[in-house]
Image (cartoon, rainbow, N blue to C red):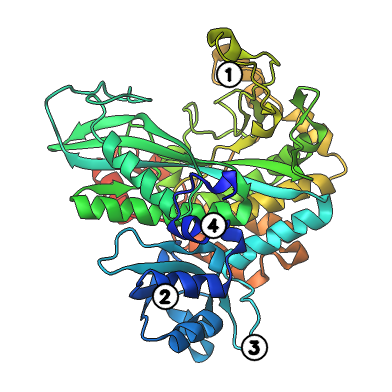
Amino acid sequence: MDNSLALNKNELVAYLKKPASQFTKEDIKRFIAENDIDMVNFMYPGGDGRLKTLNFVVNDLAYLDEILSCGERVDGSSLFPFIEASSSDLYVIPRYRTAFVDPFAEEKTVTMLCSYFNKDGELLDSSPEYVLHKACESFRKVTGMEFQAMGELEFYVIDEAQDDFPAVDQRGYHESAPFAKNNDFRTNCMLKIARCGGQIKYGHSEVGNFSDDGLNFEQNEIEFLPVAAEDAADQLMVAKWVIRNEAYNLGLNVTFAPKISIGKAGSGLHIHMRMMKDGKNQMLQEGVISETARKAIAGMMDLAPSITAFGNTNPTSYFRLVPHQEAPTNICWGDRNRSVLVRVPLGWSGGKDMCGQINPASTSATYDTTQKQTVEMRSPDGSADVYLLIASLAVACRHGFEMENALEIAEQTYVNVNIHKKENKDKLAKLKQLPDSCVASSKCLEEQRAVYEEYNVFSPGMIDSIIARLKAFKDENIRSKVTDNERKMLELVETYFHCG
């Protein structure tokens, strides 16, 4: 077996001895027949950003071949607001590379994610996963590079409060057991996500923890490795499904909501990106952030106001994006700076063998650390449809390469200080701000929609639908309306507790 597959947790990869990207219909049929699989599930994203499921009993090989070849019909009008009931039939066709053994099913089940097709057998123009595909293709066409991404998935785990080994309020970052109570839950989720094909970087407890009304709220994070952007979105969708199912089975509750309590840490969905060409990361040049990366960042600076329309999609999102807190509101970027919108994380660019210094018995490390460099968009949260969010970021990065003044914009928006400190107020005053509500985001998207519609990435109808949904919240000046109204804030939290 290829050494790169030796530790892969996906049962199909281990059995078939090939990477998931090479799975064929015959591979899926053979695995199902030789492993006594009883059920097949199709899963696909709906308009609410959650995975939907269609179940099949494996009756015989002929029927199995039929569903793997032809997929099945579904009612698109019940899945998406932009599809009319009068012409709502869609096909869902499985993508074999996404196959995994369902870790929760009582009967042995193979699950695959699907793509949508219209009545003419063409990929559905406005389906979330196809929008992302078009965004990645247009990025490749313009730049000659592959757009890769990965997410930092933050969430709260809620269970009964415990008196032993109490955690310090809002001091849970990387806490260990027994002060962190849900480490085992998180690691079990990580293993199940890996068995479903997820490429995980690490997991840890996060800053947020508090107790209220006999319940303990503990924030956690699972971060992924950078992969092709379409795979990154699939992995995030499956991960949220796994975390919710694991919590349900254990009698816990979880939420990816951006804000669940005033004065406590909100949960984001930071997206890291890198651009690859011929297998090489293009984000660094001679140890510093490259011109290529700065052009992509400039695109994100320009489209930042409208990216919130995809990444911050309900009113509680704007209680997380509050001025002078860690979640960003100012449109700027910087190195290793958590007060900015786009951060360039510490990137192992020092050129020293740190491992060798503390492990003298080992041979010198020769790892190419330039592969690790990414840039991180910090505004999105768990309310996002991950396919549309990552598509919007691919569009923004592509846009940077099409802007004549991209490097000038990058220079103007670069910040290397904490902009929230008093001595930097003049610099802060020059920066543009993110919108402060869903309605404001909808206006920004209307103003910048042409960029998203280029190359037919987002259809005009889809942009219209997103704008209409955001406007329907009628949440203008939501912060000032709710700041001193705890009851209203709790109503909003309850309404959007299970968003995304």
How far is the residue under mark 1 from the one under mark 4?
50 Å
How far is the residue under mark 1 from the one under mark 3?
54 Å
Nearer to us in this view, 17 or 118: 17
Rendered view: 475 above or below 467:
above
How far is the residue under mark 4 from the one under mark 2?
16 Å
Contact, CB < 8 Å: mark 1 with mark 4?
Answer: no
Q: Earlier in the sequence, mark 2 or mark 3?
A: 2
Furthest residue in direction bottom, as rendered: 86
Disc ID at residue 33: 2
Q: How crowded is mark 3: few (under 14 residues within 10 Å), some or many (20 or more)?
A: few
Quadrant in which residue 182 is drawn: top left
How far is the residue under mark 2 from the one under mark 1?
59 Å
Rendered view: 412 above or below 458:
above
Q: Residues within 10 Å of mark 4 (few under 14, many from 20)?
A: some
Residue 321 in the image: state x and y as whole percent: 48, 38
Front disc: 2 or 3: 2
Nearer to us in this view, 331 or 93: 93
Contact, CB < 8 Å: mark 2 with mark 3?
Answer: no
Front disc: 1 or 4: 4
Q: Which of marks 3 and 4 is nearer the N terminus?
A: 4
Give the residue pinned by disc 1.
418
Quadrant in which residue 431 is drawn: top right
Tell me which amino acid carries mark 3. Asp
Disc ID at residue 17: 4
Contact, CB < 8 Å: mark 1 with mark 3?
Answer: no
The answer to whether any part of residue 83 appears in the image is no
Tell me which amino acid carries mark 2. Ala
Tell me which amino acid carries mark 4. Lys
Give the residue pinned by disc 3.
120
Q: Does residue 200 appear to the left or right of 371 in the view shown?
A: left
Residue 345 in the image: state x and y as whole percent: 61, 27
